Image (cartoon, rainbow, N blue to C red):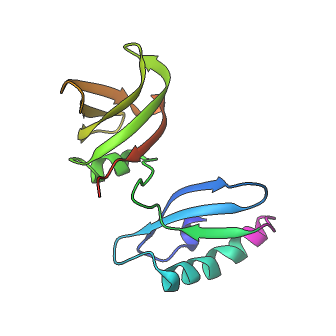
Amino acid sequence: MEGALPESAELVEARFSGGPLLTLFVDREDGPVDHEFTSNVISRVSPVLEKEGYGGLVEISSPGIDRPLTKPEHFRRFVGHEAKVKVAEPIDGRRNFIGRIENANETSFVLKLLEGGAEVELPFGSVARANLKEDI
């Protein structure tokens, strides 16, 4: 489906949001995720989804201010930003971490924790959910 997106667009996350509603969180590098852009995206992905046998409702949305971090390249792109991370299995007795992304490689990333300032390295494979934590 990513091949059906406009050139500057990125599928950040796809999830079912209550029943048969498929929500596609799409971001772009060259401008806002506005009505014109989302209309363009839906006109491109709908035929692909129908061809794959999906006939339910589709919603296109911006990833928002608490943008999900779902790929290693997201962590590299947002080095210096704060993130909230939940891991599947406890690391050092914790499952929830909030901190600034210090760096990221192909297998893990380092968070400088807001509480205490310690640095923790988290493998991407351990992440259950991660989002940017932006203050407005």
Q: Where is residue 47 in the image (x, y as percent from the top left)?
A: 71, 77
Q: Is residue 27 above or below residue 40?
A: above
Q: Position of residue 77 (x, y in %)?
A: 29, 53
Q: In which quarter of the image is the N terminus?
A: bottom right
Is residue 21 covered in magenta? no
Instruction: Tell me which residue sits at (73%, 54%) in the image.
Output: 18
Q: In which quarter of the image is the C terminus?
A: bottom left
Whether residue 136 sits left or right of residue 56 in the image: it is left
Instruction: Tell me which residue sits at (49%, 77%) in the image.
Output: 6
Q: Is residue 28 above or below residue 15?
A: below
Instruction: Tell me which residue sits at (81%, 65%) in the image.
Output: 53
Q: Give the range drawn in magenta.
A: 49-56
Helix, strand or loop: magenta stretch? loop
Whether residue 71 sits left or right of residue 2 in the image: it is left
Whether residue 52 sits left or right of residue 116 in the image: it is right
Q: Name which quarter of the figure residue 61 lies in.
A: bottom right
- Furthest toward the bottom, the residue is 36
Whether residue 37 sits left or right of residue 15 in the image: it is left
